[in-house]
Amino acid sequence: MPRHRNLIISVCLAALAACGGQNESAFEDEPDAAVVLHRGNGGEPDTLDPHRNEESSGAEILRDLFEGLTTETVDARIVPGSAESWVSSDDGLVYTFSLRPEARWSNGDPLLADDFVAGLRRTVDPNTASTYAQILYPIENAQAVVTGRLPPTALGVRALDARTLEIRLAAPTPYILGLLAHSSTYPIHRASLAEHGSRFPRPGNLISNGAYRLTEWVVQSHIKLERNDYYWNNEQVQIDTVYYHATEDVDAELRRYRAGELDFTFRFPVSQYQWILENLPGELHTEPYISTYFYGFDTTEPPFDDPRLRQALSMVVDRQRIARDVVGAGQLPAFGLVPPGVANYQGVSYTWTTLDTQARLAEARRLYAAAGYSPANPLSVEIRYNTSENHQRIAIAVASMWKEHLGVDARLINQEWKVMLQTRQDTSAWQVMRYGWIGDYNDAFTFLEIFQSTHGQNFTGFADSRYDELLAAAARQPDLERRTELMRLAEQRVLDAYPIVPVYFYTNKHLVKPYVRGFRANIMDHNYSRHFRIERNSQ
């Protein structure tokens, strides 16, 4: 039976802050005693399958539904999750995790080491088609499994007993504990997967082990979660019900927030940043964020198989003006791939950043002409971005810079997020596409690995054997200084090939109602609902 659930909890975890009351903003069919949180969540998630999700909107929900061996505090520090403790071998190659004896699935079944084994094997199994499979390459035999040379059972994970899990690594991995909080490492409820197959992540089917369980999904409206009474730390969870609202239209999201329909925004229109600073200063929370906004080229087909053209287009983008005037909310112009603030790393940048403006534009025009284009023969190109006022403003700015300095004719095409993800899979269907990468763990490798030639997230088609060699060497390198140098060499190599145009480094920006307590902006922008409390009487 589930443990007794207190409606008001007097003792909070140190990582949380303050206690709370009830959200009355919308969806008034909730029981009177229920504590409800309404969150904006960007685009509609494509799936809530933890081993196949590739979107930030889905990842935020999955962090509420599931829990890995490790988890995060409100300020994104790694702490024990479903594992209460672990030990590592002296050489850093073997980790042994002890699961919490009280850990349960949302239907009351005990959480077992074999559930983690099954989840990890499922991610690397080629039949799962996970675009995140390569994130598990640090685990012994993962690469051979992903590439079909070994069966999933060869992955270096095993259950030593019902509550003890062993993970064997191919090389010492500094970020392994952070990686084990990622959704690709979540356990799977084997019985429900066997019963429901690909339909297992749906309401009524999904059995999860996190603080919440899935009870409703209304497409293009909301996803509803309710407390998991079997969660091992349920007594420290105050919010009973969480609604994740599809809010791809950032203007509409701000209106809903101001009307009291949302307690927490996913994003807001950057054009309203100054108004928000002046009118909602106590509700605006910003923080540097390890995420990079960029445009990707299809490097596999003309015209962008020519690196001279890619470089010319990159050189004429005025990142400072975009960061200052177009987005204007503290973002930093990006002349590299890895953002500042990543642990134990200082990124590199383009070699031409030391040129003055006129010299830079002159070199861009020379490269543009060398690629076969001129005012009499201008490049005609399509720029795709997912539907958003913010993305549209940036696309307009980039297109106007290309036009002004090179004479490029650019046509803007917006698509819904899920449609754009599907378009991305077919390189013949697009030329330039807006994208962004959010660090999955606090290490530079999470940005660099997506440009490995066979990586599932490498949609640009960039392939360079030396780059792959550098990353493979970094993955094997136990010396942190040498590892960093190898990654810096790799970053410089991908920058010099121009498969992308980095535009800016993000800040995370949320509007949070004053009665939502416990929120703290963090560099990962991971915001677990179980960390929040609602205290309306404290306003």
Image: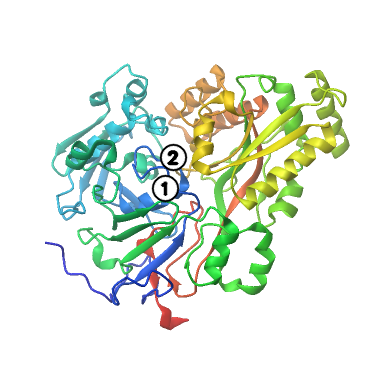
**As rendered, which of 459 and 358 lies closer to the eye?**
459
Considering the numbered disc 2 on the image, is that residue within a helix, a strand or a loop? Answer: loop
Q: Which mark is residue 54?
A: 2
Label 2 to label 1, Cα distance in Å? Answer: 7 Å
Residue nearest the viewer, comparing 87 with 411: 411
Give the quarter of the image for residue 488.
top right
User: For the residue marked with disc 1, what is the amino acid?
Assistant: Gly
Q: Quadrant of the N terminus?
A: bottom left
Q: Residue flagged by tag 2: what amino acid is it?
A: Glu
Where does residue 288 sit, x and y in percent of width and height?
58, 54
The percent coordinates of residue 214 (x first, y second) are 30, 54
Residue at point 26%, 21% (across, down): 151
Q: Taking 297 as reference, is 34 above or below it?
A: below
Q: Secondary structure at mark 1?
A: helix
Q: How many marks?
A: 2
Residue 364 visible in this rendered orientation of the protein = yes
In this rendering, position of residue 156 left or right of residue 331 = left
From the image, tell me which residue sits under label 1. 58
Question: Which residue appears at 24% of the width and 59% of the height?
Answer: 228
Q: Determine whether label 2 and label 1 are within 8 Å by CB.
A: yes
